[in-house]
Image (cartoon, coloured by chain):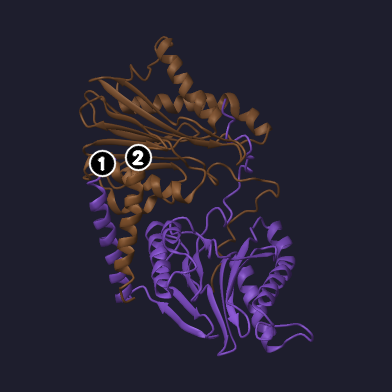
Chain colours: A purple, B brown
Amino acid sequence: MYRDNNQSARLPAPDRVPTLEEAPMTYCVALKLQQGLVFLADTRTNAGVDNVSRVKKLFTWEIPGERAICMMTAGNLGITQAVISELNEALDRPAPGEATLYSAESMFDVAQIVGDTMRRVQQRYSAGLAARGVDAGASIIVGGQRAGGPPRLFLVYAAGNFIEAMDDSPYFQIGEHKYGKPIIDRVISKETDMQDAIICALLSMDSTIRSNLSVGMPLDLAVIRTDEMQFNQIRRIEADDEAFRKFSERWSQELRDAFGVMRLMQV
Amino acid sequence: MYRDNNQSARLPAPDRVPTLEEAPMTYCVALKLQQGLVFLADTRTNAGVDNVSRVKKLFTWEIPGERAICMMTAGNLGITQAVISELNEALDRPAPGEATLYSAESMFDVAQIVGDTMRRVQQRYSAGLAARGVDAGASIIVGGQRAGGPPRLFLVYAAGNFIEAMDDSPYFQIGEHKYGKPIIDRVISKETDMQDAIICALLSMDSTIRSNLSVGMPLDLAVIRTDEMQFNQIRRIEADDEAFRKFSERWSQELRDAFGVMRLMQV
């Protein structure tokens, strides 16, 4: 009567450990609103619970008034750092005839450059990583605005292909996305006010940090307002940030209060 | 400087699809409070988006005043249904000298019986499933109370081994647990009032249903109050349940209101 819902699931190799996609240890979220773009990333990395460290996952490029670009990375750190390094190297020593982040004519071209760089880096390392049984999985959120075009937001996969955030679902999350998704689904639409979107991203991050040890402070926040073509904010929120602590506590209080209403309901 | 956080992750076989643990399609939660036990399960099952069905995942056994036992299942449906069927068969035709759910002298013995049955079922089918590339993964939450002992709650794994819910973390979730975890982490402790715990479980389920298509109505709810040794509630909440619809809408409204406070904060 019921087809078994696992008959389509294949067996894992017995000694396999989860890939990064299955056991993520990063949380980045980007929102695309009519008023602009919001980027928020944590900074925790680890190679096991005995080797926890901090690493920047949010990167920005800017020609004020002309273009502002932000990227956030998740997955194999060797891979994503190689991609970011290559993109930066190309700015200093551009190959003849090849566009860079600063010369690309559109945000679509920027996404293409990031995707092409990802492909090159994967081609260089993935066979060696595979031989050592290491997952080369990686993904990059890239967004921004260039003079003459609208703000755009893309998600670049390990294969170098990418998708764009559209109005129906105007956000991307990479890494440990589940804990922080419900608040975004409830609050964000393309019409959401920029300040509200920043608050929502921070609440989404707060829920994730609270539920998952592999995501942690400090946080990196970047904001691009539509048609400013420069960063409105680039901010690091440290672990001891007093305003963020109060914010987090207030949210706990508000949720408890909301729960206090719900507990009186008949259901 | 940073060890790559993926160097420990092994490569999946190229044609591997996720196991149930990685791509769950069930949500069950059980809470163990001083006042008793709460069990809540969804009923959705699917073998792909073109084959969505309904299946009961919550099962109860009761000798009123003497014992009340509840189980919830996740994972390979063939495996979990075989376990439940064997447990029921043993009630009708008990093997000489072997305890059943109705004759077990403690909840620990009940968990042991479930674990042993799981082991037998796995031994019978897992080689055949593996040969067909199918994951035999399954887990069962089992809890209840028998006269003379306290209420207890266990999580039985596919290998038949099990763990018990203790005061520090008095709940178990199986299946798609992440969306519904933040509210539980914020609300539940062993002192939580029973009615509050039921509300919290329903909110946790509501968030999960809203974020994940593979978890769906109707819901099965069972409640055992401490020292009653019988079910205080066994209830199915249908998809068109008016009270649950209002409850879900009210929670959305409360969250929006809470967000309305947060958006005014400086952070």
Q: Is residue A138 left or right of residue B201?
A: right
The residue at which mark 2 appears reads as B242
Q: CA distance from mark 2 to mark 1?
A: 11 Å
On-image quarter of the C terminus of chain B: bottom left
Q: Quadrant of residue B153?
A: top left
Task: Tell me what residue is drawn at x 70 percent, y 73 percent.
Answer: A112
Q: Label 1 amino acid?
A: Gln
Q: Is residue A265 left or right of residue B58?
A: left
Q: Residue at x 59, y 78 (%)?
A: A150
Answer few, some or many: residues within 10 Å of disc 1's Cα (few below 14, many 20 plus, some between 14 and 19): few
Q: Which callout, 2 or 1, points to the residue nearer the camera? A: 2
Above or below, B9 against B41 in this view is: below
What type is the residue that disc 2 sits on? Glu
Secondary structure found at label 2: helix
Element at label 1: loop
Q: Are marks 2 and 1 in contact (CB under 8 Å)?
A: no
Q: Which mark is residue B134?
A: none
B40 is higher (above) or lower (below) than A224: above
Determine the chain carrying the residue at label 2.
Answer: B
Q: Is residue A60 left or right of residue B209?
A: right
- Residue A30 position, x and y percent, is 51, 69
Location of residue B7 in the rendering, given as x and y in whole percent from the top left corner: 59, 61
Residue pointed to by mark 1: A266
Which percent across, then down, holds residue B186? 30, 54
Co-location on one chain, circles 2 and 1:
no
- Whole-percent x, y for residue A195 in the image: 40, 75
